[in-house]
Amino acid sequence: MLYNASPKAAKQLIPIVEEIGDMPLGAISGALLKGLGPKLKPNASTDTWWREIVTPASAVINNAHELEGTPLIRVKPYDKFERIAQDNRRGKLSRVERKPADKEWIEAFCRAADPYNAALVRFMFETAARIDQAVSIEPDDLRPAENKVRVKAQKGHPEGWITVSPQMMDELLALPPKRPKNRKTGKFMKPRVFGYGSSTGYNTRWKTICKSADIPYLSAHPAGRHGFFTELVVRQGVDPVTAAKAGRWSDPNLPMRIYAHAETDEADVRARFRTNHVQPDTVQTTKRKKSKKE
């Protein structure tokens, strides 16, 4: 009860409290928290166990430590062997590499899309904005004279203004704002630039567009954020620090580890070891006779 949980965290904590809520904090170990995964979510991955069980429970315990001086807890992450074993048990891989969008995919998508979805995918590909940030943009969030767009705070980053290309701004201004309907209340929301009321509302429409364009379906994250970083760093050779700053990553190591996708074929890499090196031409010099002193 000391912990000020968000609705999402509270929902995750309810089954945890039902399982171990009567235990003293000092008796709760990292191994115990990790062991709740198979019990509470037997068909989930270790990543899900960590995100939805270990993380919220640890937050509650460490919050009590700060407020009441109770024991602090540190939990060792699940290792790769635990992850692989759980993937084998549930018959499903937990870490499938995402395929990032490229310019060809973006253009094919836009040719088959309506103006709103074409502008949406271009905006995310150009700015690395998350889908929730993009669909939340309202007309007042545009500064046409400065080519700036305001995006809301998310994932530890504050609200801020990002610069877009003049062409992108023209595309945004050409969209008549729409008032989406809140699916839970049935009431109309404030006008939004892209017309979506939630971060999942685009999915069905995008699947139809991808099928019409005869391209593989990509969700917003690989189409936008993954595509942005891979395009700049892997394809265009922009240094990771610059790309990370442009995409609003505080640590360039994070996007390099998660968002940069190698695109060289493995066979091509192996072939490089068999390539004959070009030998430089030897310089022909005129021989001279040695003197007696030499």
Image: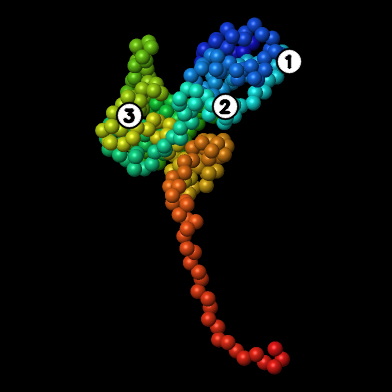
Image: 182 above or below 225 = above
Q: Count numbered badges in the picture.
A: 3
Image quarter (top left, top right, bottom left or bottom right) of the C terminus: bottom right
Amino acid type, mark 3: Trp
Image: 101 above or below 18 = below
Residue shown at 30%/33% (left/top)?
210
Residue shown at 50%/42% (left/top)?
243
Q: Is residue 82 something one can see in this rendering?
A: yes
Residue 82 is marked as 2
- Give the labeled residue for mark 1: 69
Name the mark nearer the viewer: 3 or 2.
2
Q: Is residue 44 left or right of residue 196?
A: right
**Label 2 element class:** helix
Q: Report which quarter residue 103 is drawn in.
A: top left
Q: Residue furthest right?
A: 69
Are dots 1 and 2 in contact, CB under 8 Å?
no
Image: 43 above or below 276 = above
**Residue in front for this viewpoint, 181 or 202:** 202
Amino acid type, mark 2: Glu
Amino acid type, mark 1: Gly
Name which of mark 1 and mark 2 comes first in the sequence. Answer: 1
Name which of mark 3 and mark 1 comes first in the sequence. Answer: 1
- The percent coordinates of residue 248 (x first, y second) are 51, 35
Q: Is residue 62 something one can see in this rendering?
A: no
**Label 3 element class:** helix
Are dots 3 and 1 in contact, CB under 8 Å?
no
- Give the labeled residue for mark 3: 206
Measure the C-alpha gap from mark 3 to mark 1: 50 Å
